Image (cartoon, grey):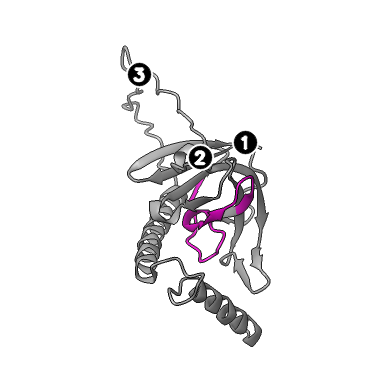
Amino acid sequence: MTDEDETAVVQYAAHVVSKFNRKQSEGIENVAVLKALMKIREEEAEKRRKQQEEEQQEEEKPDQKPDTSGNQQQETPSEGQQEQPQKTYVSLTKALQLDGVDASYRKYELTSAYQASQSYMVRANSGNELLVLHVNLKNSGNKTTECDILSKMPSFRLTINGETSVSADTTILLNDLGTYQGKIRAGKTKKAVLIFQVKKGSVKSADSMELEVKTGGTSSQVQLEG
């Protein structure tokens, strides 16, 4: 990290700390609670990363040679076997259990780095690139609404083209959808993001995407279109 990068990070961290300082007029959060929640999310993200690595290692193992002895039995579907039920999709608003605010998917982008502000940037790990989902949080009501997604502690897993499946990164971005907190005035829209790390070159285009959202023990599937 260069001196310039370090200075930028320090300035950004100072801004974040001031946001959660109870002694300032704009301080609105309990720092201890926030740290505890972020620690839990980081632990969950680490577990998911290890699971992905294990799954990738299994996929890279050479295929077993077929049995040529003639003793191999062909599997046949059981009589009366039922087909897998179709998935039920819900809106992102319902998946996040939001009240008074509508969440809607806007677009995605593949990039090596996401510029959150002039003083903070998220870079992809070596060999990866970032898939950034852009989401709108809109207050369609006639009065200011408090939007508190952080307290719900949601987790996100994205499936791309029915093949690649990755979990959202835990970030300290002020516009991270998973940790978003703030007031949205009537008729106004706030922009949020979810950031995923994918292997560089593995996703040429996202023709179909499904987002699994887990909140309060409930798992929901959201089909992203747009």
Q: How far separated are the C-alphas under marks 2 and 1?
A: 14 Å
The residue most toward the front is 143
Whether residue 24 appears in magenta in the rendering, the answer is no
CA distance for labels 1 and 3: 34 Å
Can residue 138 be spotted in the picture?
Answer: yes
Quarter of the figure with the C terminus = top right
The foreground one among 30 and 51 is: 30
From the viewer's side, name the closer residue of 188 and 205: 188
In the drawing, what numbered circle is on residue 32? Answer: none
| Magenta residues (range) | 165-191
Q: Which mark is residue 77?
A: 3
**Amino acid bearing label 2:** Thr
Q: Amino acid at mark 3?
A: Pro
The residue under the point 35% across, 23% down is 75
- The numbered mark, 1 or 3, whose residue comes first in the sequence reads 3
N-term mark: 2 or 1: 2
Look at the numbered disc 2 and give the secondary structure of its residue: helix
Mark before the other along the chain sequence, 3 or 2:
3
Indicate the position of residue 58 as horizontal and vertical percent values. 41, 50
What amino acid does circle 1 point to? Glu
Q: From this viewpoint, is residue 132 visible?
A: no
Instruction: Tell me: residue 14, above or below residue 220.
Output: below
| Residue 15, position as x, y percentages in the image | 55, 75
For label 2, the residue is 93
Q: Is residue 42 above or below residue 161?
A: below
Write down the residue under mark 1.
Answer: 225
Secondary structure under the numbered disc 3 in the rendered image: loop
Residue 115 placement: quadrant: bottom right
